[in-house]
Image (cartoon, grey):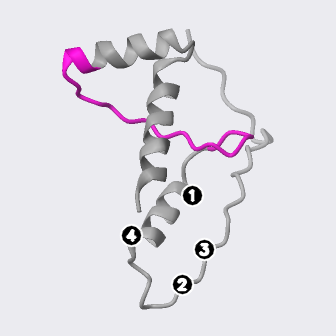
Amino acid sequence: MKKPMAAAHDPELPFPSRKPPTRVDSQNRFSPEVVARNAIARRPTTPSGNVKYAVTLFLRRELAEALTARALREGKNTPLHIAELLEAALRQRP
């Protein structure tokens, strides 16, 4: 079965608008904070401002079971529970 040919007048989908790059002085151009901000700026975000950050973790089975059991006891899903643990650890940093 042949595919129908696209008509010449088919509208193209517009590309999403891009944010203009932020200007940074040459001394801080490659600081970890600037590189991280630019990398995260390209990731999809939710309306609440959260960023989708997919990570694959290789955990010992006992640790994975303990994290999952704790999340279930607290009525949360495991990725949310891990994100909360990471946020709490970041807040404790000096």
Span highlighted in magenta in the image? 45-63
User: Label 2 to label 1, Cα distance in Å?
Assistant: 15 Å
**Disc 2 target residue:** 24
Residue nearest the observer in this picture, 23 or 73: 73
User: Label 1 to label 3, Cα distance in Å?
Assistant: 10 Å
**Disc 1 target residue:** 41
Image location of residue 90, percent across then percent down: 44, 51
Amino acid of disc 3? Pro
Image location of residue 42, percent across then percent down: 55, 54
Q: Quadrant of residue 47?
A: top right
Closer to the N terminus: mark 4 or mark 3?
3
Kindly state the secondary structure of the residue where label 3 is placed.
loop
Q: Is residue 13 above or below residue 38?
A: above
**Disc 4 target residue:** 32
> Mark 2 against mark 4, which lies toward the viewer?
4
Please rate how many residues cluster around mark 2, counting C-alpha atoms within 10 Å: few if below 14, some from 14 to 19, many from 20. Answer: few
Kindly state the secondary structure of the residue where label 2 is placed.
loop
Amino acid of disc 2? Val
Amino acid of disc 4? Pro
User: Label 2 to label 4, Cα distance in Å?
Assistant: 13 Å
Q: Is residue 75 above or below residue 33?
A: above
Kindly state the secondary structure of the residue where label 4 is placed.
helix
Q: Is residue 18 above or below residue 74?
A: below
Please rate how many residues cluster around mark 3, counting C-alpha atoms within 10 Å: few if below 14, some from 14 to 19, many from 20. Answer: few
Q: Are marks 1 and 4 in contact (CB under 8 Å)?
A: no
Q: Residue at x 42, y 90 (%)?
A: 27
